[in-house]
Amino acid sequence: MHVLVIGAGGREHALCWGVARSPLASRLSCAPGNGGIGQLAECVDIAVGDFDGIIAYCRAEAVDFVIVGPEDPLVAGLVDRLDEEKILAFGPTAQAAILEGSKVFTKNLCKRHNIPTAAFERFSDIAEAREYIQDQGAPIVVKVDGLAAGKGAIVCETTEEALAAAEEILGGKFGAAGNEIVVEQFMVGEEASFFALCDGRNALPLATAQDHKAVGDGDVGPNTGGMGAYSPAPVMTDEMCQKTMERIILPTMRAMEQEGRPFKGVLYAGLMITERGPQLIEYNVRFGDPECQVLLARWQSDPLAALLAAAKGQLAGYEVDWSERAAITVVMAAKGYPGDYAKGTEIKGVAAAEAIAGVSVLHAGTRLEDGRLLSNGGRVLGVTAQGRDIRTARTRAYQGVEAIDWPEGFCRNDIGWRAVQREEEHEAQSEE
Ligand code: AMP
Ligand code: GLY
């Protein structure tokens, strides 16, 4: 079958990597793709928002299955358009993608169905927001209702900061996405990313992962799309995964079905693991980036077959096999990211990095020009490695980073630190 992946980032490179190894795929295209994806798939120059262009390509090139990577086209209804054209697609319709598209919708759904999440109120009026924030005090979290490219949640240490954030958002800093805000209680715990493959009715949990959102070592500095990830996530024990399915994922699936918005695709729950168990921070309606990279590294059975089963409503009884080995991705970003950064700087040494056993380099923002690999975004590469545990995988990933010659890039030096710390504690205990 001819498979088309939509997107241009590291997540889409990982998806292409998974699809390319499936015996079911006879042809693989990606719109628009990037410099690394071009080595696995035919990159077609169609923007992710050009729905007419995507449909015309599907018709002309007899595409059998479309996998949509990013949230924007999902929230804007790409899957609805593909459904109308009878082209099979992986991803939720716009009515279901609202789980990511509107925090107010998701928080209200949680309230109606008793899904554990931080207590909250929503506001469109600044005077009311101000009063509530002053009543509640800090720490407190202020969020943009709509899509804000991962920059719409402001964790505030002081009431003043929270008041300023509310004023900025309702004052128009995020455009229409910020017509409403959610103000919620600050939760204490460890974060994890939980992914379930969904077919409208059934949900199949995938391997666990954790990412690092902050730009700096020690999880400090501004939030980014994600500076690295690893799988499995030690905090997600079997018990915690079961609680997450029972208390969060399955009630959401039932609620969405009841409300006439059955969810198909991958449901990504951002969780806070608290003393009272898992609490939902937010939903995303697509794979995480860079979590997708570590999941695909560990995905042993045919990933394309699983995504097809989800799209066709055939997940009941379906199983996915995972490698016992751990995987880690270290993101290399352009200096200055998540603020201003330069594009078009030359990257060398990718082949040398990939020559290291267990290392693959997944491209997030690159392009090829006259045989030279150039940076083309904020997050540029995801050096991905496997090993028997997180420590081994991490050593390899950083060997890969060392092999890459890109003076204009940087990475965090402590990806996986929590998991490594746990492995070391575990080892110390078993030696006693
Ligand atoms: P979000 O955009 O909702 O995923 O939030 C981005 C980040 O802000 C999360 O990954 C958390 O680190 C933090 N965050 C969001 N909501 C809360 C909360 N209620 N309590 C503590 N931290 C939060
Ligand atoms: N890694 C976080 C995200 O994909 O939203």
Image: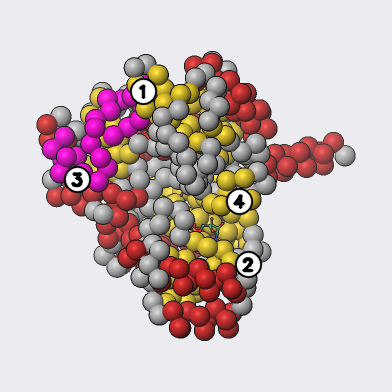
**Which of the marked residues, 3 or 1, is nearer the chain's N terminus?**
3
> Tag 2's secondary structure?
loop
Q: Tag on residue 211?
A: none
- Determine which of the numbered discs, if any, sits on residue 221 in the image: 4
Instruction: Give the Cα distance between marks 1 and 2.
Output: 44 Å
Nearest to viewer (mark 3 / mark 2): 2
Type of amino acid at the residue the image marks with label 4: Gly
Give amino acid for label 3: Phe
Give 328 or 43, whichever is nearer the viewer: 43
Do we see residue 12 in this rendering?
yes
Instruction: Give coordinates of residue 65: x percent, y percent.
Output: 24, 37
Judge the density around disc 2: few (<14), some (14-19), many (≥20) Cα neighbours within 10 Å. some
Pointer 2: what residue?
157
> Which residue in the structure is indicated by mark 3?
51
Mark nearer the N terminus (1 vs 2):
2
User: Residue drawn at (47%, 40%), measured in percent from left and top?
Assistant: 341
Residue 83, relative to residue 187: is it above or below? above
Label 1 amino acid? Answer: Leu
* Mark 3 and mark 1 residues within 8 Å of each other at the beta carbon: no
**Kind of element beneath mark 1:** strand
Q: Magenta region: which residues?
A: 32-57
